[in-house]
Every structure is written in C-alpha cells, then in structure tokens.
Amino acid sequence: MDNFTRVGFDKIFNVEKLITIFYMELSKSFCYEGESHDFWELVYIDKGAAIVTAGDQTIKMQEGEVIFHKPNEFHNLKSNGVNPPNVSIITFECSSPEINYFEGKIFKLSPDERS
C-alpha cells in the first residue's frame, strides 16, 4: 500500500487534448504581440502582475488570478512595467458545452487553490 491520497471528482467537461503547458518567468518589459487559435487557453498569474487583452477588453491581472481565452479569441499578454509576472499557460481542446462557463471570466484563486 502506498501513501498517496486518491481524490475522486465528477466529470463536468472533457478535455480531449492538451496542446501546450508552459511556466515562464517574464521580464518587466515583456510584451507579446498576440494571437488567436482554435483551442482554449488558460493563463494563470503566479507572481507579479500582467496586462491581458481578451478580444476588445484590456484587463489588469494580479497574482493568483486566472483567465480563459476561448477558441478564436484574439489575446495577448504583457508585463505592467513594474511587477514582472510569472505565468502558467495551458492550451487545450475541449468541445463540452460546459466549458463555455469560463468565457469572459477572471477567477481569483484562494491560497489553498494556489498551493
């Protein structure tokens, strides 16, 4: 017997494919021109702050916040010039209708969720 705890959960939506998983420590002058693609993208600000474009919105994101970019939404990321961000970016394919709940929302993770 091992010492690992196994936690079950209900499947609400199905991620069919992972495309990329990145963790990056960016400079305070980082600026990405932007892109759009036919899959979802999750951006998590682990440390610092960033400015994110999502469609026609410009959003100031802080440490501990997550945003989801829906397929074909133009988006970009840049540092705020003061607090260089560390970011996790995960891109994936998901065709479950329940994933649409995340469109246009920013989530602030609790300390437990962050750990």
Image (cartoon, grey):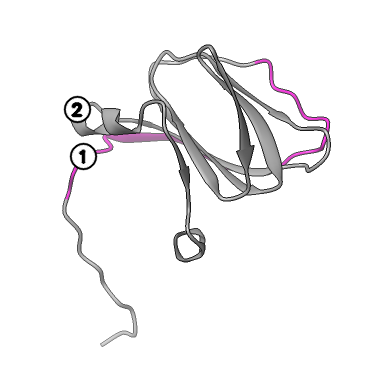
Question: Looking at the image, can residue 96 be seen?
Answer: no
Q: How many callouts does the rendering have?
A: 2
Kindly identify which residue carries mark 2: 97
Task: Report crowding for label 2: few under 14, some 14 to 19, many 20 or more residues within 10 A (C-alpha).
Answer: few
In front of the other: 104 or 45? 104
The residue drawn where x is 75% and y is 39% is: 26
Callout 2: SS: helix
Confirm whether the magenta stretch covers residue 28. yes
Which residue carries the number 1 mark? 13
Residue 84, horizontal then vertical, whole percent: 77, 42
Q: Is residue 114 left or right of residue 29?
A: left
Q: Earlier in the sequence, mark 1 or mark 2?
A: 1
Distance from the alpha carbon under mark 1 to that under mark 2:
8 Å
> Is 36 within the magenta?
no
Tell me the element at label 1: loop
Residue 24 lies, in percent from the top left, at: 67, 42
Q: Which residues are magenta?
A: 11-33
Quadrant containing the N terminus is bottom left
Q: Is residue 15 above or below residue 55?
A: below
Q: Is residue 45 left or right of residue 6?
A: right
Q: Quadrant of residue 105?
A: top left
User: Left or right: where does residue 82 sit relative to residue 100?
Assistant: right
Which residue occupies 17% across, 48% down?
11
Instruction: Name the amino acid, label 2.
Output: Pro
The percent coordinates of residue 95 (x first, y second) are 23, 26
Residue 72 percent location from the top left of the image: 42, 13
Whether residue 34 appears in this view of the structure is yes
Magenta span: predominant SS is loop
Q: Are the two marked residues, 1 and 2, in contact with CB atoms closer than 8 angstroms?
A: yes
Disc 1 marks a residue whose amino acid type is Phe
